[in-house]
């Protein structure tokens, strides 16, 4: 039987479920003084590994006989909403110069541009900025809206899609990052940016899970 190496927090979760299960995610979060959202990736991993079993409307049980290794397909069924990172957003009227500074300060490879209403308007990658910087002396006067990839050509992902769907979009479109978006109810063609998924996000999830698998 194969088992996984758990993080300290995951061990605490298993202990709580052993003692108090069936117990809901909300109740586990309360005991650990964390939010349900923070616990979501740990609960997903423990459920996939078979350490915990989840039943809708009942909660989590401990399952000592069912420890098993992860299947790659299960890993990829993890949801974008549980792994998305913080998006770095600039106004589309910002200058290319400020966008370059922002990219260095935030240590990201892609910025998202929004319009005055906060809706996604464009994507700015490193190469977009390099291209603009070649032969342009006045980067402080050049707005990013001139050089960005614009809507409706932006490939996005929604929070309920899986990491597999996100990985496929990244590879098929040969891009490094996807804005995670929510459609605005007031205007179905406009999107609010609520996160980002990058090639690094997907690689990190694989690594995290591979390192938890015991040999
Ligand atoms: P880099 O240019 O730094 O290698 P990418 O490969 O992500 O980064 O970007 C390549 C091109 O694709 C750029 O012109 C960029 O604006 C565009 N791009 C990046 N991400 C997206 C996206 N999610 N949707 C549409 N176009 C994108």
Image (spheres, rainbow, N blue to C red):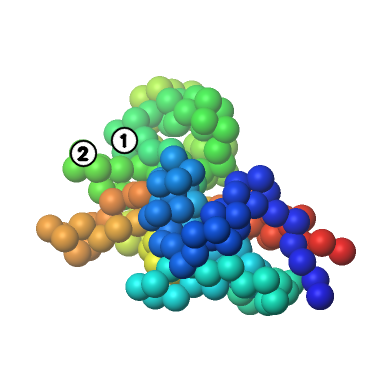
* Secondary structure type for disc 2: loop
Question: Residue placed at 41% from the left, 62% from the top?
Answer: 24
Question: Residue placed at 44% from the left, 75% from the top?
Answer: 55
The image quarter containing residue 163 is bottom right
The image position of residue 26, as x and y in percent, is 38, 55
Q: Which mark is residue 116?
A: 2
Question: Residue placed at 53% from the left, 25% from the top?
Answer: 105
In the picture shown, does residue 147 fall above or below 75?
above
* Left or right position of 36 against 17: left
Q: Which mark is residue 32?
A: none
Q: Nearer the viewer, residue 83 or 9?
A: 9
In the picture shown, does residue 76 fall above or below 93?
below
* Left or right position of 37 against 100: left
Residue at disc 1, CB closer than 8 Å to ligand 1: no
In the picture shown, does residue 82 fall above or below 90?
below
Residue found at the far right of this picture: 215
* Left or right position of 2 against 9: right
Answer whether labels 2 and 1 touch (C-beta < 8 Å). yes
* Secondary structure type for disc 1: strand
The image quarter containing residue 50 is bottom right
Residue 182 seen: yes
Question: Residue placed at 20% from the left, 57% from the top?
Answer: 184
Q: Which mark is residue 91?
A: 1
Q: CA distance from mark 2 to mark 1?
A: 7 Å
On-image quarter of the C terminus: bottom right
Crowding near the residue tagged with mark 1, few <14, some 14–19, many ≥20 C-alpha atoms within 10 Å: many
């Amino acid at each position: 039987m194969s088992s996984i190496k758990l993080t300290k927090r995951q061990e605490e979760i298993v202990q709580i479920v052993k003692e108090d299960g069936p117990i809901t995610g909300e109740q586990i979060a309360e005991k650990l003084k964390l939010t349900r959202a923070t616990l979501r990736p740990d609960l997903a991993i423990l459920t996939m590994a078979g350490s915990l079993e989840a039943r809708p409307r009942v909660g989590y049980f401990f399952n000592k006989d069912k420890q098993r290794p992860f299947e790659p397909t299960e890993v990829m069924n993890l949801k974008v909403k549980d792994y998305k990172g913080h998006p770095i957003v600039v106004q589309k009227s910002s200058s290319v110069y400020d966008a370059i500074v922002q990219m260095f300060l935030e240590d990201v490879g892609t910025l998202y541009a929004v319009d005055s209403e906060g809706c996604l308007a464009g994507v700015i990658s490193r190469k977009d900025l390099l291209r603009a910087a070649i032969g342009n002396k006045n980067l402080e006067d050049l707005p990013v809206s001139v050089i960005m990839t614009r809507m409706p050509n932006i490939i996005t992902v929604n929070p309920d899609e899986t990491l597999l769907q996100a990985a496929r979009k990244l590879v098929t479109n040969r891009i490094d990052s996807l804005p995670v978006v929510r459609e605005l109810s007031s205007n179905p063609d406009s999107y609010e940016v609520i996160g980002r998924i990058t090639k690094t996000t997907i690689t990190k999830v694989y690594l995290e899970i591979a390192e938890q698998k015991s040999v």
